[in-house]
Image: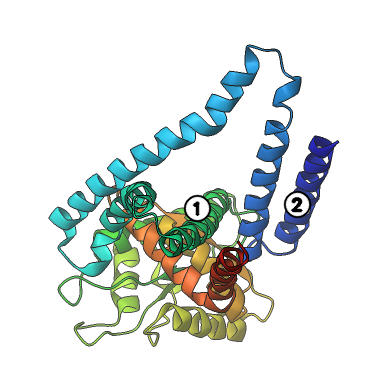
């Protein structure tokens, strides 16, 4: 009976996920509903273990608990190794240390209960319980983000679009397109050429990026020159050269597209690690279009994804910090009652 209830709950979350994504694929609640569907379905399967043949039960339990435990250890090692690679290739900036810190944090959380448990202090035990609950919540939100970001990254362009907006990412030497930005431009050109090959009206390529304090030209100008040098007619390129932030990329690009065609349809291009968060920002800015991701160097992806998650978590800090506070309060209340 409990198992059937769990399956029914998973079905309800799946239905809510389907309705929400159909309405707008760019909402973060889609990620949470996706995670809740997975968790409740996994729980429902575990509740069926007693109904399995005697030899199958241990195997299911091993898959459910043993493999995740080994996966956590492997993830910790991978993140630390990736952190070393990031420092070697990108320098010691704080943002480049995220994957290493995350890996060390995994091993720290594994060791913490054993170390603190030796103190025999109820207060210390309560603090550990609170930390574990908060880390479990943050980990759940991260897995929701990661899983749905992967799904969102599988989006394909359906039908024709009027604009292909390519988001800026900074220039090298003040006027040169770096590899990260070149990846976005190649993706934008691919979309442009694919629509052209179908015999449809070519979309306008809209590079978006203003002039930074250390740059000789606006990013949009350098991006447009890159596209034109690779065969895109200058008449098919428009520039948004005022923006300084991603939010301004969205707002100023929307102004240009709306002025040209109030009923426009577009796609925006950024790197794959940034696509889901950029999609949420595009929704907030009122942009009529989805966001596609271009390839990123493999060593760069873990740290960049962690940065994106931290930014998304902080953007929703009112909810997230409130839940963390409630979890800590629940532990304190339980300890006081006990």
Instruction: Quickly name the residue at label 1.
Output: 146
Place of residue 104 in the rendered image (x, y in percent of width and height, measured from the top left): 28, 52
- Is 299 in front, or is 175? 299
User: Is residue 327 rendered to the left or right of residue 18?
Assistant: left
In the image, residue 237 sits, relative to residue 38, either above or below, namely: below
Which image quarter is the N terminus in? top right
- Is 167 in front, or is 91? 91
**Where is residue 330, by image quadrant?**
bottom right
User: Is residue 28 rendered to the left or right of residue 211?
Assistant: right
Instruction: Quickly name the residue at label 2.
Output: 13
* Label 2 secondary element: helix
Q: Crowdedness of circle 1 by 10 Å Cα count: few (<14), some, many (20+)?
A: some
In the image, residue 13 sits, relative to residue 240, either above or below, namely: above
Count the labels in the image. Answer: 2
User: Is residue 240 rendered to the left or right of residue 227?
Assistant: right
Residue furthest right as drawn: 1
* Label 1 secondary element: helix
Residue at the location (59% across, 82% down)? 260
Place of residue 58 in the rendered image (x, y in percent of width and height, measured from the top left): 59, 20
**Where is residue 294, by image quadrant?**
bottom left
Place of residue 264 in the rendered image (x, y in percent of width and height, measured from the top left): 64, 74
Residue at the location (20% across, 70% down)? 176
């Amino acid at each position: 009976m409990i198992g059937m209830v769990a399956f029914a709950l998973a079905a309800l979350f799946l239905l809510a996920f389907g309705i929400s994504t159909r309405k707008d694929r760019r909402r973060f609640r889609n990620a949470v509903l996706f995670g809740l569907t997975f968790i409740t379905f996994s729980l429902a399967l575990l509740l069926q273990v007693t109904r399995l043949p005697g030899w199958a039960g241990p195997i299911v339990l091993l898959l459910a608990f043993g493999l995740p435990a080994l996966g956590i250890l492997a993830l910790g090692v991978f993140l630390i190794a990736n952190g070393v690679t990031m420092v070697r290739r990108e320098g010691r900036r704080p943002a480049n240390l995220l994957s290493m810190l995350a890996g060390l944090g995994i091993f720290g959380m594994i060791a913490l209960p054993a170390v603190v448990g030796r103190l025999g202090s109820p207060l210390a035990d309560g603090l550990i319980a609170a930390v574990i609950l908060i880390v479990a919540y943050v980990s759940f939100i991260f897995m929701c983000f990661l899983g749905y970001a992967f799904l969102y990254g599988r989006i394909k362009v359906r039908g024709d679009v009027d604009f292909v907006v390519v988001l800026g990412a900074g220039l090298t030497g003040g006027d040169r397109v770096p590899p990260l930005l070149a990846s976005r431009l190649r993706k934008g050109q691919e979309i442009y050429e694919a629509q052209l090959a179908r015999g449809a009206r070519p979309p306008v390529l809209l590079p978006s990026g203003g002039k930074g304090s250390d740059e000789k030209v606006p990013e949009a100008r350098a991006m447009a020159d890159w596209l034109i040098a690779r065969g895109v007619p200058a008449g098919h390129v428009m520039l948004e050269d005022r923006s300084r932030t991603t939010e301004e990329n969205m707002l100023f690009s929307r102004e240009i597209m709306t002025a040209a065609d109030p009923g426009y349809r577009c796609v925006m291009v950024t790197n794959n690690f940034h696509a889901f968060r950029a999609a949420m920002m595009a929704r907030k800015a009122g942009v009529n279009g989805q966001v596609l991701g271009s390839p990123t160097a493999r060593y760069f992806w873990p740290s960049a994804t962690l940065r994106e998650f931290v930014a998304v978590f902080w953007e929703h800090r009112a909810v997230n910090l409130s839940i963390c506070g409630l979890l800590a309060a629940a532990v304190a209340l339980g300890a006081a009652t006990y």
